[in-house]
Every structure is written in C-alpha cells, then in structure tokens.
Image (cartoon, rainbow, N blue to C red):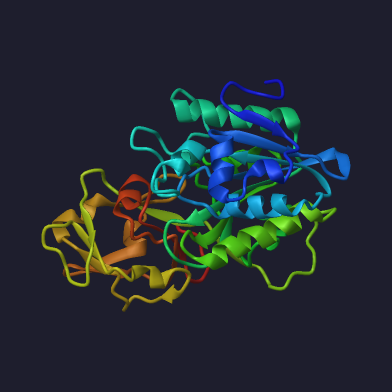
Amino acid sequence: MSLGSPLIRYWYHPTADSLGDTVEAFLQEMAGPTLLHIPGKNRQRKRAICTLLHGNEPSGTRGIFRWLKQGVEPAVDILCFFGSVKTSLQEPLFFYRHLPDDKDLNRCFKAPFECDQGRLAKAILDILQDMQPEALIDIHNTSGMGPSFSVSMKQDAQHEALTSLFTERMLVTGLRLGALFEYSERNVPTVTIECGGAQDPRADDIAYEGILRYVSQTDVLTPQQADWELDVLKEPVRLELRTDATITYSEAEDVYADITLPPNVERHNFGRITTDVQLGWVKPESWDKLIVNTPAGKDVKDKILKLEGNRLHPAQPLKLFMITTNATIAKSDCLFYAVTDDGSHLK
C-alpha cells in the first residue's frame, strides 16, 4: 500500500472546520473506512489509534472528534483508523455491531482474510506494517454496562503504561480470536481499551481523557505516576453458547429457553461473586450448550459453573466481566468472560 488503499480513505491533516459540526457529520464526511494522519511536533515518530471496529461503540470516535476539534497538536504523528463507519451510520446511529451479512471486523485480523471484512482488516494491518507506529490503542465500548478496563496479550511495563493512560484494570489473555490487539505479537505494544457501556457518558470522558494523554505525552511507553494502582487479571475464559442454544433475559425462568438470565445480570461486572450467587437458570438437558474452554482448548466449564437443579451458580469464587444482555452478541460472540477470584490459572 502506498499512502492509500482501495479499501481505506487516507485523510491527511484535516482542519477542524472540515470535520463537520457533529460526530454524525464527521462520520458522513468519512463515509467509509478512513485513516486520519495528524502530524505532530516530532515527525519521526508515530502512534496509532483504532476505533469503531464495531459500529455500535461510539466513545472512541467521539473522543477523537473532540480532540481534533480543539486543534491540539500531538507530540508525535498520530494515525487514527475508523473501521465500521458505514455500519455506524445505518439508522439508528451507532446501533449495529456489524451488519447482518458481515462478519465481526474485530475477529478478522488473521488469515485467510477472504471476506470483505477480512480484506479490510488486512488493509489496516498492511498500513500499520508500512507506517511502523511505536504503539497502538484500539478503543471500544463494552457490550454491557460496567467499568472500564484494558485487554492485552502481554503484561510488561509498556503495556501497563498504555493501560494506565485510560484505566486502572488490565486483563492479560492468551486467547486468540483474530482481534486487533493481537498485533502485539509483532512487537508493537498494543492494548484494547474498553471504555464502559456505550450509553454511559462517563465512557466518552474516559476515551477522550485517555486519548489526550496518549497523543500529548512525549513518552507513553514508560510507566508514569498515575491516579490509580493497576489491577491485573490474568487468563480469562469465555462462556460461549452453542449455535442452537436459546437465551432470554427475565426475572423468572423462561421454560422455553435453554438459558435465562435476569435483566440486571450486568451488576456482577467486575464484582466478586461467590458460589451462593445465582446467575440465572439453565435447563439440565441444555448444560452441554454452554462452552467454557481455556486458550489451549481444554474444557473447564465444571471449574467455572455448576447447576443446582436448574439454577446456575459459580463453581468457585469468580470475577466476571463483559457480561452482555444482548442475546445476539451472547450467541455470536460470548455471554461473559471470567477469571478466578484468587488469580490462579485454569488448567
């Protein structure tokens, strides 16, 4: 790729006036996948930000728009990637994670890159390879309500420093899903930032404040004095559902569903839950429709969950996060992530 791609618009040094007056106007001006290149004080160095890989996660876009409208010159060149722009513009605005006929873009950053989303992911990777940023931040909203956190493949000083620009929680995982944060494997410090729920105004502030630190500081890869101490959680596992599973959200068990969860199940996000907490209901004959595997593919469901009759409980004290009350996301991606309360690895 030269500075341009058939799949990604290259927009160099846009003026504040050219962005439009609103985030929606900004998206309409981009119209599709776009790379904004913002020159910095040091033109020899670059950092990258990616956002809007999911069309229903607006905080990163809002944060970048707010920064650009202020005209604050960054410390180094900043590359801003916007992925699912067309998806986000489908009415209602910021509603669809991905369009019904498309794959999840943030599961396409690995070979074979055969579908349209895969080709777009490959184009983003090619640009990163060509432009060699010193760090990469991928900004998301959680699919449910809950506090902010980062996701990283590595726990070292550089990844901790990037995390601390945005949040006090860091998840370290060996899961390989084809997500952009796996770019760390190319020895470029990379973290995903989950700013919190898309409907939470605080999530927009977390994105904006972190972006300002990321673009303004001369050094973002050396740990600095932060307002918080980093809480590191390791090796989460995912509760996935078989494709034929049915799930509903209700205060009482739905006898027609395989799995029923209460509508307020998100209250457990990042809280410690013990074995006496009831998470919901599962038909005993539907137990095999719940899947919990380690990154190595070992089944650890019985170490994470248990049934008491048809009542679903933790099998040991846990911390849960990314709990979703969106049945479509629960089935197409996962219902939640979990780590052991004591930090031990599931084997």
Q: Is residue 225 above or below residue 25?
A: below
Give residue 304's quadrant in the image. bottom left
Q: Is residue 296 above or below residue 208?
A: above
Q: Nearer the viewer, residue 125 or 279?
A: 125
Give residue 48's quadrant in the image. top right
Which residue is painted at 54% across and 31% down in the image? 121
Q: Quadrant of the C terminus?
A: bottom left
Horizontal relation, residue 198 to residue 164: left or right: left
For the question of whether residue 171 can be seen, the reply is no
Which residue is painted at 11% across and 62% down in the image? 255
Q: Nearer the viewer, residue 51 or 156?
A: 51
For the question of whether residue 341 can be seen, the reply is yes
Q: Farthest bottom residue?
A: 276
- Image spot of residue 4 (x, y percent): 67, 24
Horizontal relation, residue 62 to residue 253: left or right: right
Which residue is painted at 55% across and 42% down in the image? 27
Q: Quadrant of the N terminus?
A: top right
- Image spot of residue 41 (x, y percent): 88, 45
